Image (tube, helix red, strand yellow):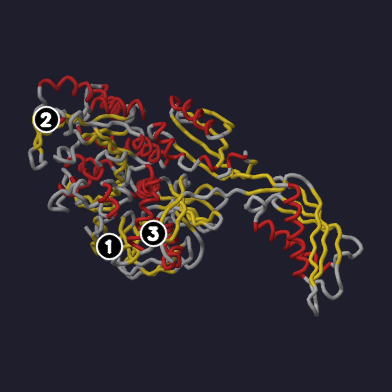
């Protein structure tokens, strides 16, 4: 397995809704391939994929996990599959994007009980946006209320008529032990060990299966002129010919096959492994893409350009220049940082020295290995198209490139990063935690780019995709980095500005023997909507000497930063210095700085201030049936809707401006309101005057 040549290797991302059975199916594939002696259970916390304590506690995948298996196909060919088990929880959609970015094929796992769920939509649309080939497996067929035909209808209604079942269950729930192969028109009957033998179809399934066989055959041959001519002349193609045509259509996205399996009983799992090997395109058939910052190209072809560089295609050629995508980093309690990587071009070996084309750091590959969940299997090299890992790459965060060049900059071509929609303020539990928190948060953000750390006033704020996302991050802070924090609401970053134009005098006059302090400034202070701060020097005749003018400006800025009468930073202010007085001995920079600060404070007190609150531009994309509820809810949050439109996929898109104070738990409320079917993006949109009741 270690030296598997690139043409035999495929990377498959298992994606879908949380609870659809991805991790259980992953276990079944590893067990059938002989990688593990027995399949673990999610409920027991014994699976290969869900090995982190936070996952075991919650019984759900929270990060992507890798596992590799070798599989011998029916034709005798040996294949290597790297399975990337991706979380289906919406808070960890960034990990879904990462899994799809390195996959050759997306295996969309759909529950035969629950059918199409919000997580199914997210996984499908994300894979479709990347142009990634897809196969759908309907799993949990052995469970009560399993209904393959209902789920197939939901899938076709949701994603189109190009989803074709190439397997049908013969019996469901407890009687699910055999499958109809639509292409060969044979029954695959399974024993208790998950192995099958072929039989004739039962009489009560012949008509339905044959109708489906004809439909699928006609669809497939319609895309192949030679097969179509033969079919029209009465020569029906055999199963092998149909599978070759199906593989071509899967690669182009013209067809998405639907198969059926049970991860618990392993019925259909061996057939699924066969199909993944046959249908997943080889890495050489799908060029990777990178973005380079200069005219140099990597690979043979390049196209497009943008503000940050040119998009280039990179062929998965083992003889090419070494190019490695570091797609995820994670802190390991025993070996330090582990970096998961995919070789896009060339061959990399243990002890190779490469340069990070994104960060500029020099890196040495101290030891390559493959991951089986948390277990490390050493290898001496990885070839183009293969996935593995390496330890202790200190300068290569998630989403960067390594290459052999000594100069130049490049990065992977990745889906747009999902923006944070939920936040919490972090309060260190002790002084020691406070001292180490900044470094630990930086490492967390390097692992997961969907986590963002910033400051609001004096508070450290962690932002992410949801409540669970941040809860897991806080738990990892404690477990991995030894930093303990409490979480609380994020303070709203209110500002204030002067209510009207006014004039004020600032004066400092102190005499206590020797040099004193003397300065007088005459100021005009007025609102400057959206303008930040403007200082105007209108002094004539030298009333304030030129070398003290900058001190007056600094004094004005001091007062603005210190806060106005309502206790918030002052913004949008125009301060004009038009007159003043000085003393040849007692005046100084500090005196004029202090006088200016006093003058601005006096102006703010005399004219009063207006409270300004931060607002966000909010975009909500939902099925049309939820649009009314979303509009009503936004109205209750003091939102102003600026646009409602129809998205390309038929969903409704609502664009609004909403005060940030009303968005504290909005993503959670929105999921509840729409059954998890909404997509939300927010971004800062400046400040607006706040009603008096808005202050918290």
Tell whether 636 sits left or right of 22.
right
First-in-chain label (3 vs 2): 2
Q: Is residue 509 visible?
A: yes
Quarter occupied by the C terminus: top right
Q: CA distance from mark 3 to mark 2?
A: 47 Å
Residue 150 image point, x, y percent: 26, 25
Callout 1 secondary element: strand
Residue positioned 43% across, 57% down in the render: 445
* Circle 3 Cα neighbour tier, 10 Å, few/some/many (<14 / 14–19 / ≥20): many
Helix, strand or loop at mark 2 = helix
**Residue nearest the viewer, comparing 205 with 7:** 205
Residue on which disc 2 sits: 175
Q: Position of residue 391 (x, y in %)?
A: 33, 65
Q: CA distance from mark 3 to mark 1?
A: 14 Å
Residue 242 x, y percent position in the rendering? 24, 33
Q: Residue at x 15, y 30 (%)?
A: 173
Whether pointer 3 and pointer 1 mark residues with C-beta atoms closer than 8 Å, the reply is no
Give the number of callouts: 3
Residue position marked by numbered label 1 in the rendering: 369
Q: Nearer the viewer, mark 1 or mark 2?
A: 2
Q: CA distance from mark 1 to mark 2?
A: 42 Å
The secondary structure type at the circle numbered 3 is strand
User: 209 or 691: nearer the eye?
Assistant: 691
Which corner quadrant of the image does residue 433 belong to? bottom left
Q: Which residue is mark 3?
A: 324
**Which of the marked residues, 1 or 2, is nearer the chain's N terminus?**
2
């Amino acid at each position: 397995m270690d030296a598997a040549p690139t043409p035999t290797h495929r990377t498959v991302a298992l994606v879908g809704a949380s609870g659809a059975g991805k991790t259980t199916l992953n276990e079944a594939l590893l067990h059938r391939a002989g990688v593990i002696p027995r399949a673990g259970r999610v409920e027991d916390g014994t699976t290969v994929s869900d090995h982190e304590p936070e996952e075991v506690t919650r019984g759900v995948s929270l990060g992507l996990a890798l596992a590799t298996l070798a599989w011998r196909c029916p034709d005798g060919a040996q294949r290597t599959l790297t399975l990337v088990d991706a979380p289906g929880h919406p808070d960890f959609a960034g990990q879904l994007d990462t899994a799809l970015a390195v996959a050759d094929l997306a295996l969309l796992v759909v529950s035969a009980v629950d059918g199409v769920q919000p997580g199914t939509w997210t996984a499908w649309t994300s894979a479709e946006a990347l142009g990634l080939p897809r196969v759908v497996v309907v799993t949990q067929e052995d469970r009560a209320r399993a209904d393959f035909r209902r789920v197939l209808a939901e899938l076709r209604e949701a994603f189109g008529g190009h989803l074709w079942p190439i397997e049908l269950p013969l019996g469901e729930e407890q009687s699910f032990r055999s499958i109809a192969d639509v292409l060969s028109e044979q029954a695959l009957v399974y024993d208790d060990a998950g192995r099958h033998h072929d039989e004739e179809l039962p009489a009560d399934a012949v008509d339905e299966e044959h109708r489906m066989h004809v439909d699928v055959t006609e669809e497939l041959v319609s895309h192949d002129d030679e097969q179509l001519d033969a079919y029209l002349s009465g020569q029906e193609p055999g199963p092998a010919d149909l599978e070759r045509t199906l593989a071509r259509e899967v690669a182009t996205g013209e067809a998405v096959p639907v198969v059926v399996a049970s991860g618990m009983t392993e019925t259909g799992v061996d057939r699924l492994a066969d199909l993944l090997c046959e249908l997943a395109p080889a890495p050489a058939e799908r060029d990777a893409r990178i973005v380079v910052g200069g005219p140099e190209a990597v690979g043979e072809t390049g196209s497009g350009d943008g503000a940050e560089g040119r998009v280039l295609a990179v062929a998965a050629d083992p003889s090419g220049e070494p190019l490695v995508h570091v797609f995820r980093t994670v802190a390991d309690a025993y070996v330090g940082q582990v970096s998961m990587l995919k070789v896009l071009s060339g061959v990399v070996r243990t002890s190779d020295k490469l340069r990070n084309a994104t960060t500029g750091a020099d890196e040495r590959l101290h030891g390559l290995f493959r991951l089986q969940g948390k277990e490390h299997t050493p290898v001496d090299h990885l070839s183009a198209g293969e996935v593995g890992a390496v330890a202790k790459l200190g300068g290569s965060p998630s989403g960067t490139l390594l290459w052999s060049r000594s100069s130049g900059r490049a990065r992977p071509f990745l889906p747009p990063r999902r923006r944070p929609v939920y936040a919490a303020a972090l309060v260190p539990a002790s002084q020691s935690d406070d001292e180490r928190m900044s470094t630990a948060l930086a490492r967390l953000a390097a692992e997961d780019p969907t986590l963002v750390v910033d400051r609001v006033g004096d508070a450290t704020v962690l932002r992410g995709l949801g409540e669970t996302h941040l809860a897991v991050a806080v738990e990892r802070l404690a477990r991995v980095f030894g930093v303990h924090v409490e979480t609380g609401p994020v303070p709203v970053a209110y500002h204030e500005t002067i209510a009207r134009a006014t004039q004020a005098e600032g004066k400092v006059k102190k005499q206590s023997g020797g040099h004193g302090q003397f300065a007088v400034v005459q100021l005009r202070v007025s609102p400057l909507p959206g303008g930040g701060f403007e200082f105007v020097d209108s002094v004539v005749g030298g009333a304030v000497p030129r070398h003290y003018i900058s001190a007056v400006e600094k004094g004005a800025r001091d007062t603005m930063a210190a806060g106005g009468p309502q206790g918030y930073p002052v913004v949008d202010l125009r301060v004009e210095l038009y007159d003043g007085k000085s003393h040849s001995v007692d005046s100084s920079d500090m005196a004029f700085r202090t006088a200016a600060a006093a003058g601005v404070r006096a102006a703010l007190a005399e004219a009063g201030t207006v409270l300004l609150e931060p607002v966000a531009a909010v975009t909500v994309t939902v099925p049309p049936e939820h649009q009314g509820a979303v509009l009503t809810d936004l109205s209750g949050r003091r939102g102003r809707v600026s646009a409602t439109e129809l998205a390309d996929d038929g969903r409704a898109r609502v664009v609004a401006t909403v005060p940030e104070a009303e968005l504290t738990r909005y993503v959670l409320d929105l999921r509840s309101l729409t059954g998890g079917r909404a997509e939300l993006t927010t971004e800062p949109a400046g400040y607006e005057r706040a009603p008096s009741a808005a202050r918290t």
